[in-house]
Amino acid sequence: MTPVLVVLNSGSSSLKFQVLEAGREPACLFKGLFEGFPVNARLTIKDPTGAVVEEARWGGGVKFGHENALMHLVSWLRAHQEGRVLRAIGHRVVHGGEAYGGPVLVDDDVLRELDKLSPLAPLHQPHNLEPIRIVRRRLPDMPQVACFDTAFHRTQPEIATMFALPRDIRERGVRRFGFHGLSYEYIASGLRALHPRLADGKVIVAHLGNGASLCALKAGVSVATTMGFSALDGLPMGTRCGAIDPGAIFYMLREMKLKPEEAERILYNKSGLLGVSGLSNDMRTLRASAAGNAQARCAIDLFVYRIVREAGSLISALGGLDGFVFTGGIGENDPATRAETTAGMSWIGMRLDEAANRAGRPLISSGDGPTILVMPTNEESIIAQQTLSALQTAT
Ligand code: ADP
C-alpha cells in the first residue's frame, strides 16, 4: 500500500485540502475545497491537472460543517484508495507561539498549548484547531501534525521581534512573530535549488495574496518580516488594514465609541483593498474597474505604495538587495502589480523585463540590478514534508 497524507487548511467557513503521496518530494494527487459552511456547503475536488473529479452541494437548509466535511473526505478517500492508505494528517496552524519552532505531533497537551494561543490569532487559530479536535475524536489513532506559519521566522534577530514596550509586557508574549512562514520556507528551498547564488544573498519575498506580507531572507533564513504580533500588521491586504497607528484604534474606541469587537471586525474584515475601494477585495475585480473607478485605482495605488515603502525598510534591515521574489495569488498572476512595484523600486537599480513580465516568465528582471523572480508558492508541499519529518522524529 502506498502511504498518503492529507494536508488541511481550515478557515471559519471553509476547508481546503490536498491529498499527497508521502515521498521525499510529496506529489499532489488531489486538491479540494469545501466552502460555504454551514448552510450553503459545496465541494470541488480536482486532480493535479486542474480537471474536476468530484463536485457536491449540501443546500436546502441542511447544516454541514467541518466535521461533516472531514468525514465526507475520509469516506471519499476510502472509495478512491486504489492501493493507498492514509498515513497522517498535516494541519496548517497559524500560530506556534514561543513554544513551537517546528512541526509537532499533536497530543492533548499540545492541543491545550495551541488553544492558549487563540487570543493571539482569534480569526485563524480556533478554526485551524477545530479539525484537529474532530479527528482526535472521530479517528483517534490517526497521527496529526501541526505546522506553523510563525515557525520560519524564529531565525529573526531578537531586535527584529521587539516592540519598544516595557519588558514585562514582552514577557507576557507581546512581541513580533511574523506569518506566512510555510510559504516563505517553500520559496527559500526553491531558491536554494534553482538559484543557489541568490539563495546565499539578500532577498525579499513578497507573498501577495488575500493575506500579504514581505519577508527579508539573508542566506535563506528570515531576518525580518512585515507581519508582527498578529496577521494584521504590515501591508494592506484583501480585507485587512495592515500597519496602523495604534493611536487611531484608541480614537475609534474612545471617541467614535466603537466596541472592541466592532473595531476588530473593521480592521480584519472591512479594510484593505475592500475598504479603500468600497468595491472588492479581489485584485482581478479592482484591475478590471480601475480605469473608470477612482476608488478602485486608489486601493491598488495604496497597496503598491505600501509594498514599496515596506520593501525599503527591509532593504535597510538586510543592508542591500540581491533579489526580489513575487509569490501568492497576486504576485504570481498580476503583471500590473509586479510592474508598478518594481517601478517604485527603480531607485535601487531594479529593472523589469516588460515582455518577460507580461508573458509570466519566472525571471522578469533585466540589467545588472537585483534579480526579480516570479515563483509559485506551495504551502501544502511544505506541510506534507514537515508532517513526514515530524512522524519520522517521533518513531
Ligand atoms: P489566499 O491568501 O487566500 O491564499 P491567494 O494567494 O489565492 O489568496 O490570492 C488571492 C488574490 O489573488 C486575489 O486578490 C485575487 O484577485 C488575486 N489573483 C488571482 N489571480 C489573479 C490574476 N490573474 N490577476 C490579478 N489578481 C489575481
Image (tube, helix red, strand yellow):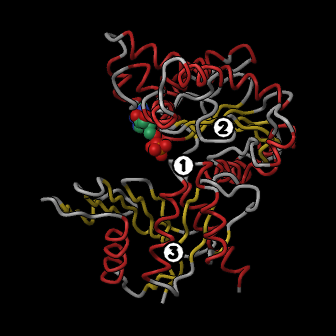
User: Can you tell which quarter of the image residue 61 is in?
Assistant: bottom left
Mark 2 and mark 3: Cα distance apart in space: 30 Å
Q: Is residue 65 above or below residue 162?
A: below
> Which quadrant of the render holds ligand 1?
top left
- Residue 84 percent location from the top left of the image: 44, 84
Furthest-left residue in this view: 60
Q: Earlier in the sequence, mark 3 or mark 1?
A: 3
- Residue 127 percent location from the top left of the image: 47, 57
Q: Is mark 2 within 8 Å of ligand 1?
A: no
Mark 2 packing: few (<14 Cα in 10 Å), some, or many (20+)?
many
Q: Which residue is mark 2?
A: 227
Which mark, by number, is residue 5?
3
Mark 1 and mark 2: Cα distance apart in space: 15 Å
- Residue 280 percent location from the top left of the image: 35, 28
Mark 3 packing: few (<14 Cα in 10 Å), some, or many (20+)?
many
Identity of the amino acid at label 2? Met
Residue 238 visible in the picture: no
> Is residue 99 or residue 260 the one in the foreground?
260
Left or right side of 260 for 116? right
- Residue 294 percent location from the top left of the image: 38, 9
Label pair 2/3, CB-CB below 8 angstroms: no
Identity of the amino acid at label 3? Leu
Q: Is residue 272 above or below residue 224?
A: above
Identity of the amino acid at label 1? Pro
Mark 3 and mark 1: Cα distance apart in space: 27 Å
Q: Which residue is mark 1?
A: 122
Residue 84 visible in the picture: yes
Q: Is residue 211 above or below residue 190?
A: above
